[in-house]
Image (cartoon, helix red, strand yellow):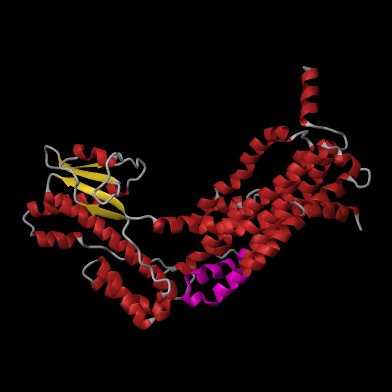
Amino acid sequence: MSPVLLVARRDYLAYIGAWGFWLSLLTAPLIIAVLLFGPILLARAEPPRVITIVAERSTDADAVKAAFAASALRDARGDIRAYLAATAPSAEAPAIAAFDAAPDRPAAIAAARAVVAERAPTALTAFPTPSPRYHIIDPPAADIQALRPYLDGTQLLTDGRALYGALYLRRDAQGAPVIEYWSTALNHDEPTNLAHRAMRLEMQREALTSQGLAPTEAERLQSFDPQIVQFDPRSSGAEGVTLRERAPFFAALALAFVLWSIVFSVANMLLNGVIEEKSNKILDTLLTSVSPMQMLMGKLLGVAAVSATLFLFWGALGGSLLTIAAERASDNIFGQIAEAFLDPRLLVAFFIGFIAGYLMYGAIFLALGSLCESVQEAQTLLGPVALVLAMPMMLITPALDNPNAPIIEMASWIPIFTPFLLLIRAPSGLDWVEIAGQGGLMVVTVVVILFLASRIFKAGVVDQVSLSSWRGRKSAKA
């Protein structure tokens, strides 16, 4: 067996023999699932926030209450429409029509559900039953000052709930509305925004009626609301952009973060491993039998095999779930997302990014580790290096917004950005020639970095060059 494979086998067995490896293997999918779906479940599990409205004019209070009710109605309509668009497209239009014809929110949800039960009963399994985000109650005290004990948590409502916030609506000397929001949730401004829009419409209605326009006509003018539909010019379909078209971009974003996390976690494994072996003089023993280049390649292959083992397990688990879901993509919202993850361009971009990114960053971290005598010394290097390596993630959001922007296209040809931007740009219809070109660029970059890293690795482990010795020589010269 070649020395490179011997080194790779030694490192591979050392890593998979640790209990932490098996713990990561089994718990990582669970952790990812919690991170992905936990916020959604927590948001849905949160009870409605209790809000009260204190107003000098009853008409102002009624306008703001109507705004909260309309917001809750829009949220429910959006949830139901998105769900039906993904699970039962044939029932979407009649269900939404029944929803809109209902007199209030509970009746609207029930009406839509009844239509789905008749036309697509299989879609009732996960039919959304959203609860409103806010529950508006009558003020438990006469004025805003008397509400302070309720708002700071000192006193609870008669039903045992806490008062989340209070909107105080008053008028200034000129009659213009002033909105005061009282709450200990200092960063939460949604109630204020809802009240602001409601009072702005109320001011417009008052201005129109003051000019002699009938109140009913003023309300009709305020109800104008144009529909918005987005289309993809590359698609021949007559329908607007749906979740099916947007899903590949969300999949690309998720894969980009997964790629970044995996590449740098395994690269950090290489860094810590070489520092430990160097400090324990294990590398000195190994280098009597293998060359520095063979040692470098063996360590890269060994940790790559560890990653491959993780991928085989996670890929078999996730791939099976994605395939099953994708087979039902026409009537399953998760199936449409799964179908996006199985897009050939995304898969090719991911594997190019992982292989090239791992070899490139792994070699860099191995070279840095060979120059350090301890983990503490490595931390002095990791600070500036981490800033450089975090730069690709700074372009993820702009690339998602406009993947074909000139600066994004140019940055995707810069090797430190290529593995991640290639993923983000793939769903936008990236040509296979450009994918192959960026893949070829990464191959050349990896070869150059491996050559340079082997020279530094040799200097660090054979010639015993280190940061501390370099600083010592520099101090002596001074």
Q: Is residue 108 above or below residue 352?
A: below
> Can residue 345 be seen?
yes
- The quarter of the image holding the C terminus is top right
Residue drawn where x is 87% and y is 49% of the image: 294
- The picture places residue 23, in percent across and down from the top left corner, at 67, 54
- The picture places residue 399, in percent across and down from the top left corner, at 53, 54
In the current view of this chain or complex, which residue is farthest to the top? Answer: 478
Number of marks = 0
- The picture places residue 113, in percent across and down from the top left corner, at 33, 75
Q: Which residues are magenta?
A: 320-346
Question: Is residue 254 shown left or right of residue 295?
Answer: left
Residue drawn where x is 76% and y is 55% of the image: 16
- The picture places residue 12, in percent across and down from the top left corner, at 79, 54
Q: Is residue 328 magenta?
A: yes
Q: Quadrant of residue 73?
A: bottom left
> Can residue 404 be seen?
no
- What secondary structure is the magenta-colored segment mainly? helix
Question: Is residue 1 shown left or right of residue 61?
Answer: right
User: Could you say which is closer to the camera, residue 312 or residue 397?
Assistant: 312
Q: Is residue 162 magenta?
A: no
In the current view of this chain or complex, which residue is farthest to the bottom? Answer: 118
Q: Is residue 299 above or below residue 432?
A: above
